[in-house]
């Protein structure tokens, strides 16, 4: 349904976008003053907590965001340990929609598998400094939403859709209800919705949504009484790990 520019629905959406934009600006300003030492210390503590979670220990396939150079918890040790533990580790891969349509975003995200620790350390940074699989390597990787990749149709490795059991998610801000504010592109929320639809289409009783865990610096947590602005398209977390603090669960 298309709403006219002056309808209450469009006003609500505009207000939501404005609130999210302002909160992102505020948190980014706060994060600009967090020292590298604090990020490293909180990253180490949060990683240890994550690796002790029963949901992590029991998972065979996990996805992990690859962290930016600054302003968020580092996941390098989590990825390295998961690979050492023999888990299948999937990382974000953002690509253009093919063919493009007026109803779809210009780019979307899938999760693609790392092949080894050497593969991980060999990833090159993208424009944001985030280690990212190269485009020409995707045809040789397992992925979660294979229908998004036309180049997979003739690749032997592509016929296997991989079910994730744990998804480790980034964010700009988080609140006490375990709602998260992303970076503004909607990649994770859109991926999770598409992933949920793919599970329903598979109609297998073993298919279920993965456990969603957020990682946050202490400076990314909103004060009690303040909440992340959300709507029905925003996915809440199942658990949140904040620096050296105990894990928070829904």
Image (cartoon, rainbow, N blue to C red):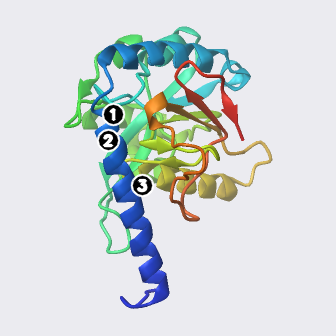
Q: Name the residue under label 2.
A: 28
Q: Mark 3 points at which residue?
A: 186
Q: Residue furthest right?
A: 205
Work out whether 228 lies above or below 30: below
Question: What residue is at 58 percent from the left and 52 percent from the top?
Answer: 235
Looking at the picture, how far across and down is residue 166, in whole percent? 62, 33
Within-10-Å neighbours for mark 2: few <14, some 14–19, many 20+: some
Q: Which of 69 and 24 is in front in this view?
A: 24
User: Given contact means CB atoms under 8 Å apart, are the residues at marks 2 and 1 in contact?
Assistant: yes
Question: What residue is at 59 percent from the left and 65 percent from the top?
Answer: 232
Looking at the picture, how far across and down is residue 220, in whole percent? 45, 37
Q: Name the residue under label 1.
A: 31
Q: Which of marks 3 and 2 is in front?
A: 2
Q: Nearer the viewer, residue 124 or 206?
A: 124
Q: Distance between the residues labelled 1 and 3?
A: 21 Å
Q: Residue furthest top?
A: 84
Name the image quarter holding residue 185: bottom left
User: How many numbered dots are placed on residues in this image?
Assistant: 3
């Amino acid at each position: 349904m298309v709403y006219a520019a002056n309808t209450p629905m469009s006003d609500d959406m505009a207000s939501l976008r404005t609130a999210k934009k302002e909160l992102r600006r505020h948190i980014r300003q706060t994060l600009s003053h967090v020292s590298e030492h604090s990020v490293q210390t909180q990253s180490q503590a949060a990683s240890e907590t994550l690796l002790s979670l029963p949901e992590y220990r029991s998972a065979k396939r996990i996805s992990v965001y690859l962290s930016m150079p600054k302003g968020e918890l580092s996941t390098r040790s989590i990825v390295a340990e998961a690979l050492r533990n023999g888990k299948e580790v999937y990382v974000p891969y953002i690509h253009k929609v093919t063919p493009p349509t007026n109803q779809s975003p210009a780019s979307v995200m899938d999760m693609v598998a790392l092949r080894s620790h050497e593969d991980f350390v060999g990833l090159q940074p993208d424009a944001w400094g985030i280690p990212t699989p190269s485009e020409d390597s995707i045809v040789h990787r397992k992925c979660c939403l294979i229908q998004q990749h036309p180049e997979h149709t003739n690749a032997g490795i592509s016929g296997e859709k991989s079910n994730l059991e744990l998804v480790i998610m980034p964010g700009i801000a988080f609140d006490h209800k375990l709602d998260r504010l992303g970076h503004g592109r909607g990649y994770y929320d859109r991926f999770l919705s598409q992933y949920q639809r793919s599970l329903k289409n598979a109609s297998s009783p073993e298919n279920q949504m993965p456990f969603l865990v957020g990682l946050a610096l202490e400076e990314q947590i909103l004060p009690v009484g303040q909440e992340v602005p959300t709507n029905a398209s925003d996915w809440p977390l199942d658990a949140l790990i904040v620096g050296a603090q105990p894990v928070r669960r829904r």
